[in-house]
Amino acid sequence: MTVRRQRHLSIQVENLGKLYRIGQGAQASYQTLRDQISRFAAQPLRWLRFFRSQDAIRRDEETFQIWALRGVSFEVHQGEVVGIIGRNGAGKSTLLKILTRITVPTEGRVDLWGRVGSLLEVGTGFHKELTGRENVYLNGAILGMKKTEIDQKFDEIVAFSEVERFIDTPVKYYSSGMAMRLAFAVAAHLDPEILLVDEVLAVGDAAFQKKCLDKMEEVGRAGRTILFVSHHMPSIVRLCERAVWLQDGQIYREGPAHQIVSEYLTESLGTTPSREWPDFYSAPGDEVVRLLAIRIRNDRGEVTDTFDIREPVGIEMEYLVLEGGYPLHAGFSLHNDEGQWLFASLDTDAEWDGKPRQPGRYRSLAWIPGNFLAEGTMMVGPSIRTEDPEILHLYEPDAVAFQVTERPGLGPSSRMGFVGHFPGIIRPFLQWETKLVDPSPWNGRSGLQMGILR
Amino acid sequence: MKISPMQVPSVVSALEQGEITHVHIEPYQGRVPLNLKEFWRYRELLYFLVWRDIKVRYKQTLLGATWAIIQPFFTMVVFSIFFGRMAQMASNGYPYPIFSYTALLPWTYFSGALSLAANSLVGSGGLITKVYFPRLIVPVSSVLSGLVDFAFAFLVLIGMMIFYGYAPTIYIILLPLFLLLALTTALGVGLWLSALNVKYRDVRYLIPFLTQFWLFATPVVYPSSLLSEPWRTIYGLNPMVGVVEGFRWALLGDKPPELMILASVIVSIILLVSGVIYFRHTEDTFADLI
């Protein structure tokens, strides 16, 4: 029985921990011989330990130790798609690095049943002097494919990458998008039983992204196990059944993806319906414009993250135009917590439309009408773009989020008293017109009244 | 995403047939296994990396393979002028150019392979931090890819032997063994240095000195016959002495290397084995340090 259960496990992680030692200086991950020699000179006894290596733990009393991961245990069954979420530095990447065997854990154990492929490594080992064809073989070998296997899949890989015409051209003449597509195509055809994905979805244009998602779903349907690390909550909810929330190197919560994501958003994003970048050097944007703040306000002007479905939602963006002459449009995208893109909007203010902006600080406010969105978590991704020539100055997906709920007793809403699951990704309060056209359509023949019903 | 068992033919059948590979990851307790089996499983990657190195090396250079000849050939010319002509260095009765070239041939391979191997890990940082494979493949591929240059340079030797009218001795069949000795020495030292280089970047600056001193510690510009026994055998503790003497013996019919080759082989094997062990011990930290 245990054997059988074990066989259908795909990933088993037990009490996993990874300790990183960080040198006293800010970086200094490698040392110079001089440091080492001075240390040896000070404590000659350590020479004896030198050849036993790995005694670094005791040697580095004076260095920082950071547990990037500690006491992490979880199991993933074959065919499951599990999302890993958490803030930067929560240990997500360390976990994937251990699972892909790039780095070795300090404690604990991992068992993997099946070939592991990861999209961490997209484009690894690509050499720009080599042709596309040569790189497919090289990259395939690096990812662990046999030559015969690459021979078999070669045409499929090339077709998927859409670079057929340039396959015998050195990769240095490719655009970065083409190189990326070819790299992804190789990785996507590795056919691993366990696929580890780390935010590659940011790669390529929208059409190609869709292809990648489709490929991932296809992989998932073929019974593959997928571990999906992303900051893009909508994708997590859309693709994963289960999610693991890492925080400070430990599992903070684990459960159904939509539930965990919703809790994650409420705790980490939802509590801050506004984000500000006080230091514009590090603010999102380019040399033309920087985003200073995005806030969500209600119609009383308060910054809040909870709205009644009937309330209008104000999206306020503050940005700094550093270089004049660009006819900018502020805008935002709105996603729901299932990852569906509800709509995008661009600044429609006629006063500024098509006019080059002068440098300065701007504030744009857009109103999403009340009685328009459905209930749920909404994620706002501010962007600023120029249409001609087309430049995307910045886009911060899911920068802020807010919750739409429906509280009873606040007047009419689209539900009209219906309390069950109300489908639909938006819920506009439509204008209905209902008239009594003819109060007596049966023309006085009262017998007909009952006859129609029977 | 809902997945019903009906839709999972390939993996399920693989599971049932027990074809699924099982990987167990745990920190080593005590001894680190050498894992040569794993290395063998990745032999195709080794092939592709060697193939890449060779291809890239000749692709963007104007002179391509000519570079493989230029370096030993012009070193030979310079040595012939300064050591052969001006310093009147002894050459066991052979014309100085061919005397020095027979030594420069394995030497150029050795020093090139050594410095390529020593810098190989740091140079492949992008690979090491992103993909798992036995790291041993990286320095091994550097040492192997240098053999192509050796082959080109060997063509020049054939030309010179015809020019000076020397026929190789029957012992030329042993030449691959002497080349192998140069290879294992380069790999042994290269493994030590490449692993140390990850941790201490000083190694990069050490390599040019090392190869320069080593050149003069090896009978390239002078004959080892300047020494008598037992010093000759002790001299053989430098494995490149065995290689160079072996080359001269097999190609020109010079004095056989006798006992000194034994010393060279033993030292070379010690270097290789200790190099592999040290490399394996530090291998796990490469990705964190690079």
Image (cartoon, coloured by chain):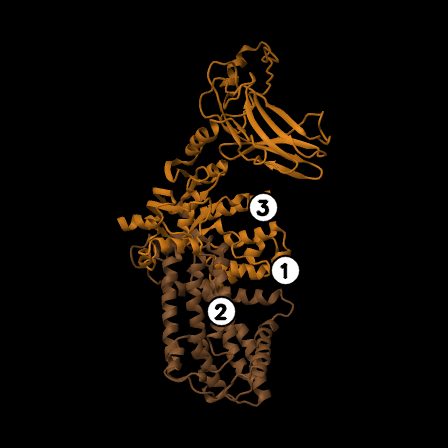
Chain colours: A orange, B brown
Callout count = 3
Instruction: Point out which mark residue A288 bears.
Output: none
Disc 1 target residue: A169
Horizontal and vertical percent position of residue A444 = 58, 9
Dot 2: within a 10 Å radius of its alpha carbon, few (fewer than 14), some, or many (20 or more) residues? some
Callout 1 and callout 3 share a chain? yes
Identify the secondary structure beneath mark 2: helix
- The mark found on residue B211 in the picture is 2
Local packing at callout 3 (Cα closer than 10 Å; few below 14, some 14-19, many 20+) is some
Q: Marks 2 and 3: CB-CB under 8 Å?
A: no
Decide which of A154, A30 is in the foreground and name it.
A30
The amino acid type found where label 2 is placed reads Thr
Number of the label disc, if any, that sits on residue A204: 3
Q: Is residue A173 visible?
A: yes
Question: Mark 3 falls on what kind of element?
Answer: loop
Query: From mark 2 to mark 3, how far is it between C-alphas?
Result: 47 Å
